Amino acid sequence: MKLVTAAEMRRLEEQAAVTGTPASELMERAGIGVARAIRAFLGGVAGKRFLVLVGPGNNGGDGLVAARHLHRWGARVHLCLLSPRPQDDRNFALTCQQGIPFTDAGPDALPALKGLLSGADAVVDAVLGTGRVRPLDGLFRDALLAVGSARTARPGLAVIAVDLPSGVDADTGDADPVTPRADLTLTLGLPKRGLYSPPGAGLAGRVEVVDIGLPPADEVPTELLDAQWAASTLPPRPATAHKGTFGRLLVAAGSARYVGAAYLACMGACRVGAGLVTLATPASLHPVLAAKLTEATHLPLPEAPPGFLCGEAVAPSVEELPRYNALLIGCGLGQGPGPAAFVEGLLSLLGDIPSVWDADGLNLLAALPSWPQRLPRGAVLSPHPAEMARLSGQAVEDIQRDRIEVTRELARRWQKVVVLKGAYTVVASPEGRVRLSPFANPALASAGTGDVLAGAVGGLLAHGLPPFDAAAHGVYLHRLAGELVRKEMGQAGTLASDLLPALPLTIKKLMEDAHAR
């Protein structure tokens, strides 16, 4: 599903008008769609008391249409106009004809609003939508503060946002401090980027898309990962296959301090279906890891100091590379002269083998001059924000401020696939396409989950998926497995290794759901 900016949404609405669907018709579709979704969310509206906050533009118009239909279905609706509506406003006139009471914008609006909030069952926030371009002030600010206070005093008060919670930036997710948290956001036509970017994502509650009949958004370069896409990109598993069919992955990982990272990365690849995984690790770690990784094969390598790969490990690694379809490097590799010499030596001899770079592999890359030009084009980089900062020279705060555009720009500049990890993980291609994960899961905020993700991406890359698809598919499977773990075990105390058995179950469910569709 495509994710749009405010400007992209305006262009789609303009295209709709050119092809015969005027703005008035889009507003009518939006309003009745919002009303229907509210009715489904609340389990009926008859007799319930609704306060509809009406802003000055199209978002307010959508709220007026929704109010009309809620009233027609038996709801007790009161409108609160936060700015005057135009004299020729047809939708406001229709609400008046139906006898829907309203409070006009003016000095008495705020006291009236507070009184209405005390008895409302639900508030419909139709104030600003994508029109928020400046800090909120005046009656807008006071009204939204009042909604937040009422919500605190009465947790059962439902808040439903039309298109976006008012005060949330449609493009970046930046939010005004007074923006009230919604239980449900009914985004119109297509979801907006800001609904999947913190802090806006945390204010949106459940997000549902209301179809308003927009033209196809083929030119929009950003999309939200979903189950239908993931099922369509699952690598085939023919009955006559052998292990070579599903790809061979070489994993260069592990050090004296981070033995577990190598295990998690290898098992992540195995659990997404890689046919053969080989761990290349310091020779002194081999006995421990061989005992734990019984399904993998092993390549013990020279080390100096003990427990860390060194420059002498490059030659045996490169000698093995032609046997493999992809390489994963970095998980728990450690830093220092030995690993640095290994990475620099390997980098000059990689050739065109697809590769995934994670953790210390990225940190060691960042220390090398002109590293993007030295890394093959088919590489996938999977940094968390601090690693992205080291690679790019930008501040973490600047990266987090607009994760989508920063990742898109760096993928273009470096000509690599970039996976910016974290809540709502971003995957960007060198061509400027972006796929966004719809998940934010505190159960994944523990050591080692990134190693499992790197392994999953590496396994899919070895299987033959193109780098952008392998990265996005790995992110989606990893996050969906995290949702399964959270559902079964809760948000605290889950371990990275809990994801491993969940990965094949996730793939199984995707396949079953696809067959059902």
Image (cartoon, helix red, strand yellow):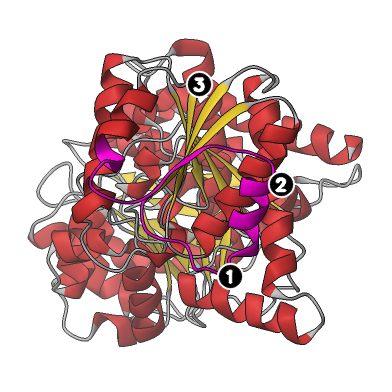
Residue 109 lies in quadrant: top left
Name the mark nearer the viewer: 1 or 3: 1
Q: Are marks 2 and 1 in contact (CB under 8 Å)?
A: no
Find out whether the residues at labels 3 and 2 contact each other: C-beta distance under 8 Å. Answer: no
With 500 as the anchor, is 399 left or right in this view? left
Question: Circle 2 sits on which residue?
Answer: 33
Q: Residue at x 8, y 62 (%)?
A: 337
Q: Which residue position is annotated with label 1? A: 88
Examine the structure image and report whether residue 262 is included in the region drawn in magenta: no
The tag earlier along the polypeptide, 2 or 1, is 2
Q: How far apart are the two marked residues, 3 and 2, measured between alpha carbons?
A: 34 Å
Looking at the image, which is closer to me, 367 or 231? 231
Q: Answer whether labels 1 and 3 touch (C-beta < 8 Å).
A: no
- Vertical side of 127 occupied by 134: above or below: below
SS of the residue at dot 3? helix
Disc 3: which residue:
485
Q: Which mark is residue 125?
A: none
Regarding residue 302, the answer to whether it shows in the image is no
